[in-house]
Amino acid sequence: MIKKIEQDFRILQLLSQTFPDVASASTEIINLEAILNLPKGTEHFMADIHGEYEAFIHILKNASGSIKRKVKELYADTLSKDEIRELCTLIYYPEQKLELIKNEAEAETSNASELEETLSRFYTLTLGQLTRVCRSVSSKYTRSKVRKALPSEFAYIIEELLHESPSDDNKTAYFNCIVNSIVQTGRADAFIIAICDVIQRLAVDKLHILGDIFDRGPGAHIIMDRLCQHPNFDIQWGNHDALWMGAAAGNDCCIANVLRLSLRYGNLATLEDGYGINLVPLATFAMETYADDPCDLFGPRLDKDDTTHNEKTRRLIAQMHKAISIIQFKLEAQMVARRPEWNMQDRLVLNYINKERGVYERDGKTYEMTDTFLPTIDPANPNALTAEEAELVRQLHHSFRVSDKLQKHIKCILAHGCMYTICNGNLLFHASVPLNADGTLKEVELNGKRLSGRELLHNIGITLRSAFNQDTPREERQFAKDYFWYLWCGQDSPLFDKARMATFERYFLKDKETHQEDKGYYYLLRDNAVVCERILDAFGVQGKHRHIINGHVPVHASRGESPIKADGKLMVIDGGLSKAYHGETGIAGYTLVFHSRGFELIQHEPFDSAQEAIRRGTDIVSSKQIVELSGRRILVRDTDKGRELLSQIEELKELLYAYRHGIIKEKK
């Protein structure tokens, strides 16, 4: 022990600043030992949200059904199904539901006295029910952790209610008095809202977002606002996130792609309302350049029941969509010329257009084009921007760079994110790990180094962060900014991992064979348990029950595809939360819950709206699949946090020994 203390002497001296004597060190050991024997907190996994903010927020509020499961456990014998549904809706949307309840009560009562009595009964009953639910979801945590989750205004009252049982005869009057006082002082609404928020916070200990917050749906900025306020979450960057990060960093190729995708799905709200991106210059340029072009192939992909876009708006979006697409292909060709080491010469697509004949000629083949009206392309120099296009790019670049809210959200993504995470025996990443044909890890060049697996993803993360650091040398910073685009569409990018991106071909060539994007070996081999074990070994993932969890490629449940692969070693939780995928996947996404009893995979049906959920108590229709059930309840001791606490206990025991043997003196 003395030799160990000598090795750790500096650490123990620092530790003694926090625990200055035997009593304080002993108390902390007792506290940590107690925490080790609590059930592990619930982890909540979501992927590929793609701007669908209403569904995301609802799933977050109900913790993929965890809150309803708790309410059913508590009230299955005393409340009807309708009453359970109403209570759950109140927990999810307390402000809106309370307003609806009060309006209904007012309509059903004849005078103010009767209304007051009706609401008083409702408040008294509801406060008791919510307190019991809150007590249940907080039972996994220490009082200290629960206290930190409580709103300051009601912290003392909620804590008293949580830790005093109304069934105790000696405390019944005390408990009832607190509840009655809340009602009589007119604070019932505020208190209900506060305790519902606490229930939502404590239902899930940690939230994991496995990439792709942005694009397609209308509310990525709303999702980011919510995440930036979340108490405990992490993000594994997705390809669409990298695209927006690159746009915020000032990569013009990324900016053009962000605009093109937003216009393709008629999603201008995130750009204009969310981030204040000025689209007037693009609209003006597009209307002038394509005034005589119907731009039929560039119309936005909208819901069948869309009523927010009239014909004039749709035509303008189509013109803007075509304009930015051509600019994108030019900018990408310029990037390819600047970074020849990326071997992306196949992206020089405009070089093969024969404007005179109106065809596409490549590799000795001639392809019919769907659109030949290309007024801004000069056959002699097809990848050169016109003067008007160059000025437009400059204006758009400025708009993205000066968007305070976008920069704030990207800082949040950087602060809470990385390319991968290892947590409690699970390896989390968005898309893939580049592999060779035989399933071994593929070496990929990055900044002149050949890297694979964990080292590759780690160094990519460092590179991306350097794009936002002012102290990064100029050349390194420029490479980092450029690399965001490679991550979006480079063959060996772990966020893409395909032979090529056939954007131009899908827009302009009729031959569908040219649209093919062959997937990398990770997607071809990921159902092989041996390959998954090899990846887990390479990343140093420990544990008897370890898994890979990722998203990116939608699981086609309607075709019978399973999200559970490689004998349970891999779980793919992209089931198509985005409305754009609903027809393709047949469902509206998966989420995963990992609690103290094991893993549950939740399959969701499309979500109507928050308004319907509040008004009618409708929830996302979900089906639950037990992926893996633990033979015993998983404790904090069994988790990464537990191992950290055990290490702290050992250091504290060393400190105790040092105090008792006079090696370090107590500070009275």
Image (cartoon, rainbow, N blue to C red):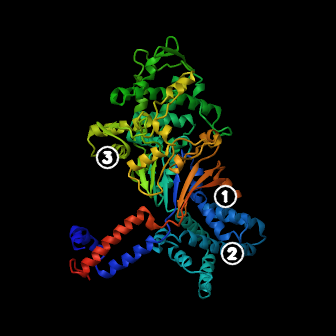
- Residue, disc 1: 614
| Residue shown at 69% from the left, 68% from the top | 76
Under mark 2, the amino acid is: Ser
Q: Characterize the local packing of mark 1: few (<14), some (14-19) or many (20 or more) Cα atoms within 10 angstroms.
A: many
Q: Position of residue 193 (x, y in %)?
A: 58, 66
Q: CA distance from mark 2 to mark 1?
A: 21 Å
| Residue shown at 66% from the left, 49% from the top | 608
Please name whichever residue, 553 or 619, is drawn nearer the observer in this view of the structure: 553
Q: Earlier in the sequence, mark 3 or mark 1?
A: 3
**In the image, 27: left or right of 611?**
left
Q: Earlier in the sequence, mark 2 or mark 1?
A: 2
Q: Are marks 3 and 1 in contact (CB under 8 Å)?
A: no
Name above or below for residue 404 compared with residue 479.
below
- Residue, disc 2: 120
| Residue shown at 60% from the left, 25% from the top | 296
Name above or below for residue 424 compared with residue 567.
below
Q: Characterize the local packing of mark 2: few (<14), some (14-19) or many (20 or more) Cα atoms within 10 angstroms.
A: some
